[in-house]
Image (spheres, helix red, strand yellow):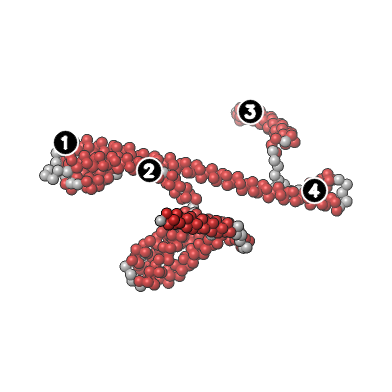
Amino acid sequence: MSQHFYHQPRSRIMTNSQLDSASLMFFAKFGTFQRNDTQCQAFVKRVIMSRLFRLIMITTISMNALMMVLGTDFETKYSLFRLCEVSEIVFVSIYGAEFFMKLYVDPINYWKDGYNLLDVMVIIILLIPYCLQKIKGQYHPSLHIVDGLQSLRILKLITYSRGIRTLITAVGQTAYTVASVLILLFVLMYIFAILGFCLFGAPDRGDVNNWGNLAMAFFTLFSLATVDGWTDRQQQLDSRNFALSRAFTIIFILLASFVFLSMFVGVMIIHTEDSIKKFERELRVERHMILMEEKQVIVKRQQEEVSKLMQKQKNADYKSFSELVENFKKTLRHTDPMVLDDFGTSLPFIDVYLSTLDNQDSTIYKLQELYYEIVHVLSLMLEDLPQKKQSHSSENI
């Protein structure tokens, strides 16, 4: 008996160890796996990341949304039936090609991105009508619900709009705070619902339509919190001469609408501003990285040019490298790009900059002298003008 109890755990331990070793071997082999189509993968990745591809996808999604809007009118849908069918095939083909291209570039990390999972969900919704028509027929009642779900295709715009993704991130960051505010609002509504049911929900002389039970009381409080038609409900309470009805309504509206809903909006605004600032910081970092990449390209090109000059010096009849550089300077143009590290702190630049300022000061001084001379000449002309008028008048007399 004891042998039986000791034998069973041992077999289980051996099984677990075998599974662990097998999984480790599988992941080790998979981790060291290298693709043989790296060039094709890099090309497809460049296509996906290009601005033209993004523009094509945004145009396709927008046109698909427009065709769905036209499909809501039966006369338009009947007159453009062939165009709607062909465009539907084109849209589904483009969405499928996008999915397979992204999956081909990175088949593992593709499933780790939430926006890619959203695209997969949209593609599944796209395929549901075709599968349902094959299984249940073309006139199944569930097809109307599935056709309504096709409006979710426009969610694919989220993948190609960083602004929308920023807002979604802000909403996701506010989930915990918003949930706390909503729980506090629910607690407040629960307290006032019980209180309103006890004060105004009496079967004999109470407002049974609005406060007859707890569900009706919650619905009435929700309308009061949104300040929608609260005067009509207050008139119904006033007609039954409830003494505390106005104080009850005013206190609840102040707490629910002016405090909790304002708090909810404030939390959303704060997190949205934080997300926008983070988005702007990311944009600045991306621009800096792009500038650094361009700088590296220019520096690399300059190094190649210098190496060519060195090689040219060896092959040509130049006495020194400085002579070669002087010859090279004569071929430079003002449009040639140039990258200089710490250019503003170099002594030649400071010398040129100060001499430029001196020349600018002297030029401004000469212009001021010229302006003074012009003003002086104009003043003399104005002084001589009355004397000339008097001389003309005397001659006429």
- Amino acid identity at mark 1: Ala
- In the visual, does 117 lie left or right of 286? left
Label 2, secondary structure: give it. helix
Compare marks 2 and 3 and give the one earlier in the sequence.
2
Which of the 4 quarters of the picture holds residue 176? top left
Badge 3 or badge 1: first in the primary sequence = 1
Which is more N-terminal, label 2 or label 4?
Answer: 2
Report x, y in % for residue 123: 45, 62
The mark found on residue 243 in the picture is 1
Q: Nearer the viewer, mark 4 or mark 1?
A: 1
Q: Let me know if residue 6 appears in the view.
A: yes
Say which residue label 3 marks. Answer: 379
Front label number (4 vs 2): 2
Amino acid of disc 2: Val
Nearer to me, 136 or 379? 136
Please name whichever residue, 186 or 18, is drawn nearer the observer in this view of the structure.
Answer: 18
Q: Position of residue 165 (x, y in %)?
A: 47, 50
- Mark 3 residue crowding within 10 angstroms, few (<14) / some (14–19) / many (20+): few
- Residue 50 is situated, as x and y percent measured from the top left of the image, at 57, 57
Residue type at mark 3 is: Ser
Disc 4 crowd rating (10 Å Cα; few below 14, some 14-19, many 20+) is: few
SS for dot 1: loop
Q: Mark 4 touching mark 1, by CB under 8 A?
A: no
Of circles 3 and 4, the one toward us is: 4
Structural distance between the alpha carbons of marks 3 and 4: 57 Å
Q: Which residue is mark 4?
A: 328
Q: Secondary structure at mark 4?
A: helix
Cα distance in 3D space between marks 3 and 1: 89 Å
Q: Earlier in the sequence, mark 1 or mark 2?
A: 2
